[in-house]
Image (spheres, coloured by chain):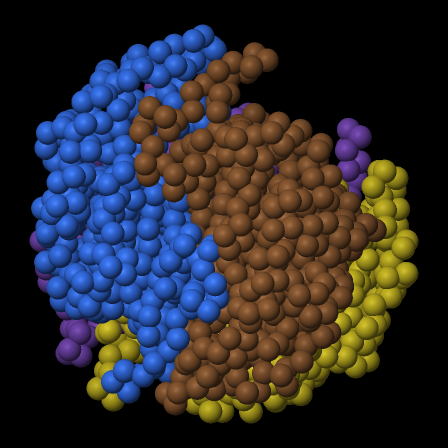
Chain colours: A purple, B yellow, C brown, D blue
Amino acid sequence: MNSFGLYFRVTTWGESHGPAVGAVIDGCPSGLKLSPEDIQKELDLRKPGQGELASSRQEEDTVEILSGVFEGKTTGTPISLLIRNRDARPGDYEKLKDLFRPGHADFTYEGKYGHRDYRGGGRASGRETAARVAAGAVAQKILTRRGIAVFGFVRQIGMIILETGEKGFWETDFSHAGISRIPGLRREIYSSPVRCPHSETALAMEREIQDASCRGDSLGGIVEVRAYGLPVGLGEPVFGKLDALIAQAVLSVGSVKGIEFGQGFGFADLPGSKAHDAYEVLNGRVHPASNRAGGVLGGISSGEPLIIRAVVKPTPSIRIEQKSVDRRGRPVTVSVDGRHDPCIAVRVVPVLEHMVNLVLIDLLLRQSAAQGVKHG
Amino acid sequence: MNSFGLYFRVTTWGESHGPAVGAVIDGCPSGLKLSPEDIQKELDLRKPGQGELASSRQEEDTVEILSGVFEGKTTGTPISLLIRNRDARPGDYEKLKDLFRPGHADFTYEGKYGHRDYRGGGRASGRETAARVAAGAVAQKILTRRGIAVFGFVRQIGMIILETGEKGFWETDFSHAGISRIPGLRREIYSSPVRCPHSETALAMEREIQDASCRGDSLGGIVEVRAYGLPVGLGEPVFGKLDALIAQAVLSVGSVKGIEFGQGFGFADLPGSKAHDAYEVLNGRVHPASNRAGGVLGGISSGEPLIIRAVVKPTPSIRIEQKSVDRRGRPVTVSVDGRHDPCIAVRVVPVLEHMVNLVLIDLLLRQSAAQGVKHG
Amino acid sequence: MNSFGLYFRVTTWGESHGPAVGAVIDGCPSGLKLSPEDIQKELDLRKPGQGELASSRQEEDTVEILSGVFEGKTTGTPISLLIRNRDARPGDYEKLKDLFRPGHADFTYEGKYGHRDYRGGGRASGRETAARVAAGAVAQKILTRRGIAVFGFVRQIGMIILETGEKGFWETDFSHAGISRIPGLRREIYSSPVRCPHSETALAMEREIQDASCRGDSLGGIVEVRAYGLPVGLGEPVFGKLDALIAQAVLSVGSVKGIEFGQGFGFADLPGSKAHDAYEVLNGRVHPASNRAGGVLGGISSGEPLIIRAVVKPTPSIRIEQKSVDRRGRPVTVSVDGRHDPCIAVRVVPVLEHMVNLVLIDLLLRQSAAQGVKHG
Amino acid sequence: MNSFGLYFRVTTWGESHGPAVGAVIDGCPSGLKLSPEDIQKELDLRKPGQGELASSRQEEDTVEILSGVFEGKTTGTPISLLIRNRDARPGDYEKLKDLFRPGHADFTYEGKYGHRDYRGGGRASGRETAARVAAGAVAQKILTRRGIAVFGFVRQIGMIILETGEKGFWETDFSHAGISRIPGLRREIYSSPVRCPHSETALAMEREIQDASCRGDSLGGIVEVRAYGLPVGLGEPVFGKLDALIAQAVLSVGSVKGIEFGQGFGFADLPGSKAHDAYEVLNGRVHPASNRAGGVLGGISSGEPLIIRAVVKPTPSIRIEQKSVDRRGRPVTVSVDGRHDPCIAVRVVPVLEHMVNLVLIDLLLRQSAAQGVKHG
């Protein structure tokens, strides 16, 4: 099942060390201005950084638009996006052929498919997400025109946490950020090598990663993604709820092991009297006076910012030796000295942003369908 | 979007205070023995308990099988399940007609649909989940024959936590539970009014709920669900990953605000060297030596138990007064003295179990499709 | 696969001699006035007529709306429709239990499912179409508000043909029928026991059926369905083309063995110079000057009337003896003296009309989705 | 909606004069040997012939496999197929930019999308079908291993008809063709420039086309497609019936205006006593003694050959002048002197064959899913 979305349907394909990865978008409305640059700028945000914080695999990630765009505008027909793999080094992986690396999908792919592309994780590689980002960039263009803006940042790496709660960074800094501020905020976030907008915390995170990297180890983290400017009404009860689809989208990204909305796991020890958002009237419009719910109620957007947090496990490919077995069951020692990010949470930020974009565009189209016929 | 699953497709319908709720199952294989009792026994587990811990709405939840079963066996055609609402008291809700209750879906349904059934939450009511449990009971029958068993329990209510970690309850009690022990374990769990298998903790949880109830307040909690006996190979990369579909399924249940797999949010501060599961050989079979991943790697089941935890927000309908506004924006005070469970986490246990059943049956059918053609 | 449509998704269920048949509609916009009578009047058109021309099974076909409608208007949630089987006489079919009746689905259901409901064809019975008509009636209400009207009629029974071509009935009578005339035209058609609007031809058809019926035989026929008032633009290339979806919808009706659009099979011996429709300007608007294409070009509606013809095979249940075998391969003689229409084409008219309605509403919603986001 | 199939899901993309066309296959089982040559040989059958009977556009149609195949075998992940457009001459179409050509999709694409790629029909071009054939070739490989063989041929061009009825070509020549004979039969068919297996009729057809071509005109025709070796049981009632899905698949091919199964439109004037197939026992197995139904009953395959006929309209691009208007409504004359086949029916044969392959593989997987779980 390599397609996502019902109305704005994205199908991705490709392996880490095959000739290319790509995406086909089916359902993009016609008449949208779209250039390779629109997509390229988002792909560039997904690239690894420099130095110890990042993989040394260097991919240009140049996108080609093979269909669906004519004279600079979408035609309503499928948009095929192609990204060639240039720095693939399949030979590096020969020794992993018979090995089940801890924390990787080697064992389960072998069990499911029998025959697998073992080179760099094949389809299970993070490289597959380049196609998602490319497709998400198209969604983002439409959402932007509708006043919807999505951004993400790293909230925790190892023991270093960016407090964004009542007394923390968020309250004072982003909470009232107009949508117009968001592109600037994203630039700021991406200028940080750890994708953290608070420079002091960012510095501590960098050190944390460097320390782990020196030890030959890796780190997990938490990424927060927010969407501003949503209308009331996105989400399709009961199985296409906004939060259900976001959860599917976010958990479909490799290494993500959990998600929460608004107060999330904090709801477990909150009494009902302190857990919910009352309504008030502001500028003649009823809206929630607080946002503990994280922008979604009954699976439908409330008009408040959508706030999600996803936990990302540590990179499984580390230099520290791990014991395992090979496919014949013989004991082996795994120590990976390759081109790997020591903290995937950092890399995953744009991917989660664009998965949220893909959910939102799909729900926006579904909502438009009903509205169009209703008022017709 | 009121359907779930691709191969074992369940469509639910119905409102809390309409004539009935129901489900249609499309894709159930033929030849399966199925009686109303098979479904009824699961519906009975979903019923509220007694006294202060539970809603006083008393529904018989009697299921009728209207199609798809002939002479006690499924025919392969759609199975239509009907559950009449008998203790509906729509009149009780007249006063809520123009009100946006904090924490409920009133505001977002109004915003999305314009016209809504305000009686007891309409479609957004927990009552809708009776249809899911009925459908899940059919899935469960097939899974049982394949040696797959799912069960859930309450792990946390308010401040009371059942420790199931390395030194806690789980390690000593369930971890090596054979699948054959699970039906008994479920009976034990459901004999506890708070669905907690550890009697001391259960007692503390009961007191916690009673205290909250006395104060006119409610509590959140955490539910854990596990599936044993999975083969290696369930899950369809990249958007139909086992964890992605479970996340969609679980977040589609009202009041759930987050989910995690295995170590979940704990992965954020684990180093890579302690986060992953090495492999070992046991009885000539390679398998993970530990289960930090919670049974899923690269979106595919590893053969180890699937372990998920979901956080459930506190019941929004409480006696304590909450300030809000009505649809015209006039300030109102909401105090609900009705038929509501003070802790939804307790009620949600069988619903989450059966949502997991629905994901597993669907993935099992998908896996069978490929296997069947391959070996043909 | 008992669901049809992507945006206005209809799931039907039920067997001929089970307790009921029904449909669930998912995706109907909210705010639409809908009463049981709206649906009942269409179900009434599907009922068999009287006398020798029709089955003597007498079903009231009373529809219950179990969900999705509140205070007389749709809420946007699933609409569950239930029609109880009242005149079911399962006992009549005991002797058919082990028999493969020629022309029926007995043999293929047995082969596919192993275990089947043999009573009156079970799920393969024409009775299942009551659920389709009920769902189609909801679609029709929305289409009517958008100025779209669909109607069907019998064009051929046995050797009797209603000529609607260049010099025939159609050219002079319906071709310029405004949409406003269509409800009247439908009443007229349904007042004919053979659903043929031309009284002389209708009389000949009636005689044809009576003759066949006397001989213990049955007849095939051709039904034509038309849709007026379509906007330019319905249909989703390349697999959701208007004609492709109509073909799926129409062939999904039992007994239909073929379909054609516009000149249809007549295109085989037309030269290109006489096969296509030039464009002209009328009232300042470009449109096709003729309609050989039958209203669809490149899979997209052209704004001209949609014209389709479907061939319906003769009723397989006849009094004349047919030789066959039973499930053990023993020779048997089949002679059916039951409650069967001697010409299914007559009964199928409203079913085909409503299948066209279901395709159109779905495509209208898809088109609205794109338009809504585009102009937003 | 550019995807087809539920289990073996094919998504096509690309325009006639864009950089490429392609397909992504999602759901192909792993472990299947697959090389570019397997696909290339089918693409080669789709290429135009030589001389007056064919378009002079010369495309190599070289296929690249970009993913899903590793070391010569499928991996179960999406198979991305790419075919570059090499002989595109977009400049040729500049003059058609503002024109609505009769019989083409220009007018309806303009109406639907506003912005369209007018070069050679863009997405509506027959060139899109190269991607379908490439995907179908993969399906064909699996079907072959299961003993299923599909082939098509031209049955009628203009007034020249290949009689395959009771006294015609079919009865004596193909009817008892074992499946093993079919590859040879296909080679024979494709060695005929008009794809007709009967050499005398083929010659007459060639002359018919040449005559039309000389007059600057074009011709319609009828293509027959058959599938042998089907098991009993393919097809998913009620909306995924074998015939319903075949009808959707076949009508989704440009220029096809109708389809019939078995006796098809001939059923209209057959009495029931002569229309159906009795059963008999042969080699201890019950099966239909004749095949008027065309291999499908109640939407499920009967084990007899699937027989369909599709009517194909004449090429709309002809040299004879046709009157039309441009997008501003000004009268124009259209005369096309380009690279066009005078009879599309000839070109469409492999496309229809492979659309049938795509339906069959999808239904085979669905059937396997149910069987696998049932017997498990």
**Residue D88 screen position, x and y as percent:** 20, 25
- Quarter residue A192 falls in: top left
Residue nearest the observer in this picture, B40 or D181: D181
Apparent side of residue C245 relative to residue C211 in the rendered image (left or right)? left
Residue at coordinates 17% horizontally, 74% vertically from top-left? A327
Q: Is residue A254 above or below residue A233?
A: below
Residue at coordinates 60% horizontally, 72% vertically from top-left? C15
Q: How many marks?
A: 0
Residue nearest the observer in this picture, C192 or C281: C192
Residue at coordinates 70% horizontally, 65% vertically from top-left? C51
Apparent side of residue D158 relative to residue B145 in the rendered image (left or right)? left
* Residue C32 visible at all: yes
* Residue B151 visible at all: no
Residue farthest to the top, as pictured: D330
Q: Is residue C212 above or below residue D111?
A: below
**Residue D1 screen position, x and y as percent:** 42, 43
Residue nearest the observer in this picture, A48 or A200: A48
Residue nearest the observer in this picture, D62 or B124: D62
The C terminus of chain D sits in image quarter: bottom left
**Residue D131 screen position, x and y as percent:** 25, 43
Residue at coordinates 35% horizontally, 11% vertically from top-left? D333
**Residue B54 screen position, x and y as percent:** 77, 75
